[in-house]
Image (spheres, rainbow, N blue to C red):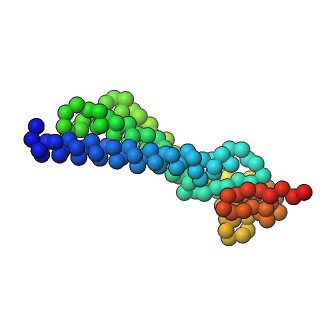
Amino acid sequence: MSRETILEWLLYRGAAVVLIAIMSAVLYFIFFSVPMYDLHSLYMHDEIIVYHTKAVAGAAGTPIYIYFILISLRVLFMRGIKPPTTQTFIGRIYGAFSLIISIVCLIIAFLIPIGLAFSPYSNCPQEKLGNYYVTDLELCKTIEPRNWKIEKKQ
């Protein structure tokens, strides 16, 4: 193999590894950070709901992130120097599915505040608590914005 061929092989494989690392980091952030807490509080419908549109919209992209990881794995373990130029049937189906699901979830992420406006939840009037929705406005006084813990009154 010539030097250019080896460099080309390293370039494609290196790009695949970098893309896998970036997408894995994004997925780790989504599953173990702000977006999952927001989705959990929406699902539980406790007295306090934390909702950031950007966090939920980022979580909506999860199927796309997984799709990019799968494509990168295919490039990484493919024989030959050049990456594959055609998609598999399963790849086309999953790509279309993930795109449709992500678009629908993005739309839903921006419609959730409208749904919360028509629910028994009220938005906290304080500026730094703008992402918190509560069943009773007195609960806004008990919220610590950094880690949204509720102090129980005794």
Relative to 153, 117 lies left or right: left
Q: Where does the C terminus fall, quadrant-wise?
A: bottom right
Task: Identify the image quadrant of residue 73.
Answer: top left
Q: Taking 125 as reference, is 72 above or below it?
A: above
> How many labels were placed on the picture?
0
Left or right: 41 with respect to 33? Answer: right
Compared across the picture, whether 80 is left or right of 96 comes to left
Q: Nearer the viewer, residue 57 or 2?
A: 2
Quarter of the N terminus within the rendering? top left
Of 147 and 68, nearer the camera is 147
Residue 50 percent location from the top left of the image: 67, 55
Give residue 84's position: percent from left, percent from top.
Answer: 24, 36
Residue at the bottom extreme, as displayed: 127
Q: Residue at x 75, y 61 (%)?
A: 143
- Residue 58 vs residue 9: left or right? right
Q: Which residue is located at x 26 percent, y 32 percent?
A: 78
Residue 77 in the image: state x and y as whole percent.
29, 33
Residue at 46% x, 48% y: name it. Answer: 25
Residue 27 in view (yes/no): yes
Q: Residue furthest top?
A: 89
Establish if 130 lies above or below 89: below
Residue at 20 percent across and 41 percent down: it is 9
